[in-house]
Amino acid sequence: MNGSPLMHFEIRGATLDDLRAFADETNADLGCRGIARKEDEGYVIDAFLPEDELNAAQNSRAAARVTLRTVENLTAVGQERQAEVSTLNRFVASRDNRGREVAGERVRGLGEKR
């Protein structure tokens, strides 16, 4: 990744060939098993690209035959979820001066929250 936020978006097109042409031209990540879904007006598939590459992809030749809809900013969602994670090591309990267990130590080393 290039530092640009990772975006989850949908590619909508009248035919599977339209979706394929866009994905091939832009190198959009379709996940490990991207499967297009049939809808009333064609097909849709989920895809992933950094935001700056998505903006550039909107100007590609194949983009004229598809519609793109941003679903979410995955980088922002990941940062929000990371804020929910404690920095304490739940596997290491310490004791206060009365001998009672208290919360674990701050995480160090490879388990450090970033």
Image (spheres, helix red, strand yellow):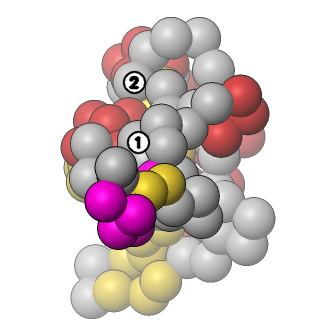
Is 19 located above or below residue 21 in the figure?
A: below
Q: Which residue is mark 2?
A: 5
Decide whether residue 103 is among the magenta residues: yes
Residue at position x 35%, y 67% from top? Answer: 100
Residue at position x 49%, y 43% from top? Answer: 105
The span shown in magenta is: 98-104
Q: Position of residue 71 (x, y in %)?
A: 25, 54
Q: Identify the secondary structure beneath mark 1.
A: loop
**Tag count:** 2
Q: Is residue 67 visible?
A: no
Amino acid type shown at disc 1:
Thr
Residue at position x 39%, y 24% from top? Answer: 5
Q: Which residue is mark 1?
A: 87
Q: Position of residue 113 (x, y in %)?
A: 50, 34
* Residue nearest the viewer, comparing 92 with 70: 92
Is 39 located above or below residue 68 in the figure?
A: below
Amino acid type shown at disc 2:
Pro
For the N terminus, which image quadrant? top right
Instruction: Report the disc number at residue 109.
Output: none
Which secondary structure is most common in the magenta stretch?
A: loop
